[in-house]
């Protein structure tokens, strides 16, 4: 009898309806993906042809395959062993459908979700190492995931996060300045880099994307960015001029003032040159932010409940003034957060914000904690959806692949939101399991259920033999062609 009672208790915990994942909902995931594709279908058409079905095939590949998501493998796994992936390759690498309407439609749909109001825009860059310099935008540049300068491609990415939803809502491939010289003219044409595309810094690209999101009325409350953007006073000032709140990470050697500096042009002395640069006139002295850690009032701030327990940090905040090269003075919040010590890492992180003076420390700490979701966005896009599986050289290929990866992420987010409304989790589970927060559906969870409704095609022995046969034939023909070229070279005078 005791065993039976235990089994009944376990049965209650394993009831999927209590967890908000009824079988009838999971069984419709395939049709749900098809419905999402139909909402975006018109955006994948060009003036001369309708290749939108290829977008659906590609989305299925990103969402259901585990690895090796190249054109041929996706085509074979989704459509069958006779496919060679040529149509898919043309759609991603060469078809001229624009990506901005795809990102814009994602933003429109995000705007329509009540649960996503007041989120954070996250601005970051994501890089991948390249073995050669012939891919669009490839150059020696800082690759964040490697933590060093190396040969690679870098994209500037705008994310959006709120609670347990994190998305990519805009992106653009960064093209280093050398890609606009005459030596790269042929490659620019061959890789479909738009002729009207000028050189833009990462900060210019990021600002353009933020302003597009604002123009599209994406309901964000604040922008979060790392030190690449945060250290630039002009970037922060432009966001402030646009009435956009930000929390921007800064380096530890950033100079700030604890009293308002009076800046102006000093009077010319009897001897010497006439001053040409503004200076601080009232004797206010700047201090590096890292030198303030011992003099501020620190508090333990509870940020939010998580699966692993309540998230809290030791934080301190103070109003400071910054001065740019032109002598413009701005008052900002300085937030310092104590970090868990990592190898070669710093004990503290530093951020500046244009939030109003009455902003509570808890709000600043919450915003700083939301920067974590930028990392989760990249992690899910790469490890779960094959964002870094792309092996292609063309600008269009990177832009198209990234837009479709963003759409796959939105499919996950949209599904989680809809299910949370339709099938709420049983709150009794919190008490029964003695936890503060129930785990949310992950990208991997949704993909697992989607594979059950849209299984990948499996080869029969006969199909596998034919596939290998064709592969060997292609290799032999390639060898024959190479040998012919060698013989021609040997016979030429």
Image (tube, rainbow, N blue to C red):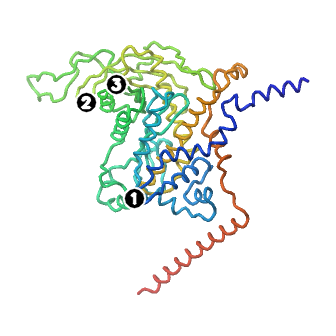
Of marks 2 and 1, which one's residue comes earlier in the chain? 1
> Residue 480 location in percent, x, y?
55, 78
Q: Which residue is mark 1?
A: 191
Q: Position of residue 388 (x, y in %)?
A: 53, 49
Kindly identify the residue that appears in the image at 11 percent across and 29 percent down. 273
On screen, residue 209 versus residue 128, left or right, reads left
Of circles 3 and 1, the one toward us is 1
Q: Give residue 61's position: percent from left, percent from top.
A: 58, 51
Question: What's the residue at 70%, 23% (across, down)?
Answer: 429
| Closest to the observer, 312 or 77 | 77
Check disc 3 and report the residue beneath it: 255
Q: Nearer the viewer, residue 41 or 87?
A: 41
Q: Is residue 130 left or right of residue 283?
A: right
- Precedes in sequence: disc 3 or disc 2: 3
Q: Residue 325 has which mark?
A: 2
Determine which quarter of the picture holds residue 96: bottom left
Q: Secondary structure under badge 2?
A: loop
Instruction: Say few, some or many: other residues with alpha carbon within 10 Å of mark 3 (under 14 / 14 to 19 / 20 or more).
Output: some
């Amino acid at each position: 009898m005791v065993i039976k009672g235990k089994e009944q208790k376990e049965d209650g915990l394993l009831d999927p309806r209590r967890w908000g994942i009824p079988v009838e909902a999971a069984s419709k995931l395939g049709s749900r993906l098809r419905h999402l594709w139909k909402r975006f279908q018109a955006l994948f058409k060009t003036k001369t042809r309708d290749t939108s079905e290829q977008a659906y095939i590609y989305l299925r590949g990103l969402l259901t395959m585990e690895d090796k998501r190249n054109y041929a493998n996706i085509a074979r796994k989704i459509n069958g062993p006779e496919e060679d992936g040529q149509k898919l390759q043309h759609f991603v690498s060469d078809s001229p459908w624009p990506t901005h309407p795809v990102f814009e439609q994602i933003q429109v749909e995000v705007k329509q979700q009540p649960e996503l109001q007041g989120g954070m825009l996250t601005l970051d860059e994501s890089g991948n190492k390249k073995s050669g310099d012939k891919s669009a935008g490839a150059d020696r540049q800082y690759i964040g995931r490697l933590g060093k300068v190396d040969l690679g491609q870098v994209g500037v990415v705008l994310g959006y996060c709120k609670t347990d939803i994190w998305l990519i809502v805009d992106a653009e491939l960064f093209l280093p300045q050398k890609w606009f010289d005459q030596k790269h003219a042929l490659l620019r044409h061959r890789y479909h880099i738009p002729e009207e595309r000028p050189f833009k810094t990462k900060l210019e690209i990021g600002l353009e994307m933020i302003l597009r999101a604002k123009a599209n009325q994406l309901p964000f409350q604040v922008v979060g960015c790392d030190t690449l953007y945060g250290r630039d006073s002009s970037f922060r000032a432009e966001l402030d001029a646009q009435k956009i709140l930000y929390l921007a990470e800064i380096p530890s050697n950033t100079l700030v003032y604890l009293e308002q500096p009076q800046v102006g042009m000093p009077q010319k002395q009897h001897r010497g040159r006439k001053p040409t640069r503004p200076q601080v006139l009232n004797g206010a002295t700047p201090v590096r932010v890292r030198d303030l850690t011992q003099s501020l009032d620190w508090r333990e701030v509870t940020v939010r409940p998580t699966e692993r327990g309540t998230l809290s940090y030791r934080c301190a905040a103070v109003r400071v003034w910054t001065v740019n090269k032109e002598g413009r003075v701005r008052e900002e919040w300085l937030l310092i957060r104590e970090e868990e010590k990592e190898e070669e890492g710093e004990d503290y992180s530093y951020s500046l914000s244009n939030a109003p003076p009455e902003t509570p420390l808890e709000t600043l700490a919450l915003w700083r904690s939301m920067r974590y979701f930028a990392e989760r966005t990249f992690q899910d896009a790469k490890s779960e959806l094959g964002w870094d599986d792309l092996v292609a050289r063309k600008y269009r290929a990177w832009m198209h692949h990234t837009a479709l990866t963003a759409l796959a992420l939105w499919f996950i987010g949209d599904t989680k939101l809809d299910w949370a409304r339709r099938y709420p989790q049983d709150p009794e589970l919190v008490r029964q399991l003695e936890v503060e927060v129930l785990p949310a559906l992950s990208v991997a969870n949704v993909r697992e259920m989607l594979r059950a409704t849209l299984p990948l095609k499996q080869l029969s022995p006969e199909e596998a033999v034919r596939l290998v046969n064709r592969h060997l034939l292609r290799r032999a023909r390639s060898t024959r062609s190479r040998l012919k070229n060698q013989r021609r070279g040997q016979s030429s005078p």
